[in-house]
Amino acid sequence: MIKNILALVDFSCISNDIVKRAGELASFYGAKCWLVHVATPDPEFVGYDVGPKYIRDHRADVLYKEHSKLLAYKEKLVREGINCETLLIQGQINSTIESEVEKLSIDLVVLGSHGRSRIYEFLVGSVCEHMLRHSKVPMMIIPNPLKKK
């Protein structure tokens, strides 16, 4: 029985498809849909307690815009009658996702695959690949619609 669905939103071209599919699944199962964005942690500055003001102001603006986008996705799903919540969390992406999946008792994760090159994934890593290897719950992976075949 699926009661909680977590949709990972990164605001890339796949995000609309991820939210749409997670909403459809939540509607079908009568589940709660969690729209989650993991924002990069604040930069650490040597010699500063919390960093220069202009950096803090810029970071606050970025987080505000990301939160506003999440709320717009939520409002769309709520208008469709879907029980939906949003979470914007700063942290290391893989461990943060794993933690939220456990905390929220997630039954299904919906995420996107960007379809980047193997070299990129080897050097930088891939959230999708990490989740495939470490997830304890089923996943639905949405392919990048712009990735050429």
Image: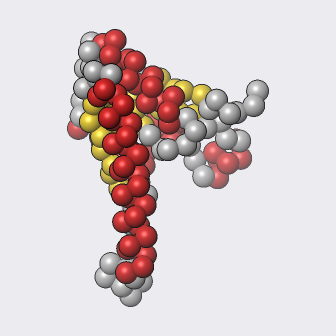
Q: Residue lying farthest right?
A: 149
63 is higher (above) or lower (below) than 54 = above
Q: Quadrant of residue 118?
A: top right
Q: Residue at x 47, y 30 (%)?
A: 18
Q: Is residue 108 visible?
A: no
Q: Quadrant of residue 58?
A: bottom left
- Residue 61, x across and y down, in percent: 40, 64
Closer-to-camera residue (49/76)? 76
Q: Residue lying farthest bottom?
A: 47
Q: Is residue 144 visible?
A: yes
Q: Residue lying farthest front?
A: 79
Closer-to-camera residue (29/61)? 61
Q: Residue at x 27, y 21 (%)?
A: 81
Q: Residue at x 40, y 25 (%)?
A: 22
- Residue 55, x across and y down, in percent: 43, 75
Task: Answer with left or right where residue 29 lies relative to residue 140.
Answer: left
- Residue 119, x across and y down, in percent: 71, 47
Q: Residue at x 33, y 42 (%)?
A: 71
35 is higher (above) or lower (below) than 1 = below
